[in-house]
Image (cartoon, rainbow, N blue to C red):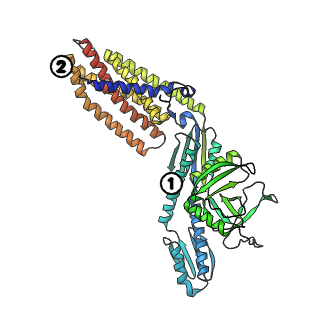
Amino acid sequence: MVYFAKWKIVMVLAICLLGVLFAAPNLVKPKVLEGLPDWLPHKQISLGLDLRGGSHLLLEVDVDAVIKERMEGLVDSVRADLRKARIRYTGLGIDGHGIKVTIRDTDKLDEARTLVRDQERDNEITVNGNTLHSAMPEKAISEARIAAVEQSIEIIRRRIDETGTREPTIQRQGEERILVQLPGVDNPERVKEILGRTAKMTFHLLDSRQVGATGALPPGTVMYPSADPNEVINGKPRMYLLKRKVEVSGESLIDAQPGFDQRFNRPVVNFRFDTRGAKKFADVTAANVGKPFAIVLDGKVVTAPRINEPILGGSGQISGSFSVQETQDLALVLRAGALPAPLVILEERTVGPGLGADSVAAGKIASVVGLVAVIVFMVVTYGRFGIYADIALLLNVVLIGAALSGLQATLTLPGIAGIVLTIGMAVDANVLVFERIREETRAGRTPISAIDAGYSRALKTIIDANVTTLIAAVLLYSFGSGPVRGFAVTLAIGIVTSMFTAIMVTRLMVVTWLRRTRPSTLPV
């Protein structure tokens, strides 16, 4: 253990140098880093919500809206099948998590039942007299809820990433809730607007029929208001009667970018379909030249232009009363994809940067006090060897900062607690070695033999103790969330770096001193 190969010495010195280089950017301001050469490390430690300030949102996914939409589609499909089969019916509509319909032709009840079952084979079909019920089973409802929440998390992540927010926390909480924490967000209202938009875009043909005197809509139609604030009739938004059938869905979009229409001098959003969507778009526009074609976004008609000619290129343009910022946000949410269900903001908190600064200051004080206390203890207890352990301890703190910067792991207040704990634990390995060396010296061994025995015999204990703690840190990270993960990250990094500094760095300094001075007694 007292022999150090040259390649080991080079490796230890290289790791220490890299640690200093990667940790150094945290000591200067971001403006200074911009002027440094590109080959030098530029990354700084990313601070979490509790240190940097930002926005905290608790969202709830309106899963019932997904099931309702699914049932509305089932109603339309059943209506079309019954009419095609010339089966008379009444009372077709949604009933809870299913649909119901009363068949007038009793002799065709079995045929109608087959038609209803074929539309949604997983549904449970029951018959009560002449009334058919098609209901989603509990298993299907549960699966729909899970899928809606998981898809919502993925879409939220895409939208947040598009805004440029670094190190967001997006995780499921409970069955239908999603926790979103955005460190450093200086415009939470814009983020809420982006997250709150379902961004469900559909294309519909307008229906030329009239609404009944009682306000009843013609079968197979839906009424949507205009999104343009300039389209107002009697103080209310203009209403469009559209065919319920979705001609082209926004799911076929592969790109959306903000642009500017030079002809009308206004901001627009240019979109592009995939191959399947482009074909459907071309077929619909070719078959309906001269008819108005409405673009519906989140239940409002954005625009309803007339189809002058077939659109064969698979691309189009959304125009309206948009500002430049609105077109950018609309393009962002369309690129990220539509949410499967609306989101409801249940809780909102804004953490100011002042509170974060206080937390950082308190963490620094705790770290410095702990560091000084450990340094003094080691020097008083172990003398020269204590000084070597203190040098390794300072290097350990540098390596932790370098690892956090290089990995871009988020540092939270519990993470600072993990660093403070690591400072106290980092010298444990040295204490075990030094105490073992003392025992070997008292037993009459020579300095070289005592140091060799001290490191070799304490190594197994050091590894066992640190590996068990590392396993605990990994489990905390795997099963924990938020603050718990922040603590686990710094603890795990601290364990790895302290193992390196205690076993390699301290031993290199002790061995170098031993070879140069050849002491007759050890100052430990």
Q: Is residue 357 above or below residue 82?
A: above
Say which amino acid is labelled 2. Ala
Q: Is residue 188 above or below residue 337?
A: above
Numbered circles on residues, count: 2
| Residue 256 seen in the current view | yes
Q: Residues within 10 Å of mark 1 (few under 14, many from 20)?
A: some
Seen from this angle, which residue lies furthest left? 444
| Residue 247 seen in the current view | no
Say which residue appears at 56% left-offset and 64% top-offset.
Answer: 67
Say which residue appears at 54% left-offset and 39% top-offset.
Answer: 166
Disc 2 is placed on an element classified as: loop
Say which residue appears at 35% left-offset and 40% top-offset.
Answer: 471
| Label 1 close to label 2 by CB (< 8 Å) | no
Q: Is residue 418 above or below residue 441?
A: below
Q: Nearer the viewer, residue 511 or 204?
A: 204
Mark 1 vs 2, N-terminal side: 1
Residue 209 bears which disc, if any? Answer: none
Q: Position of residue 253 (x, y in %)?
A: 58, 57
Q: Is residue 460 above or below residue 270?
A: above
Residue receiving disc 1: 150
Residue receiving disc 2: 443
Q: CA distance from mark 1 to mark 2?
A: 64 Å
Which mark's residue is nearer the viewer, 1 or 2?
1
Q: Position of residue 151 (x, y in %)?
A: 52, 55
Q: Residues within 10 Å of mark 2 (few under 14, many from 20)?
A: few
- The N terminus appears in which quarter of the rendering? top left
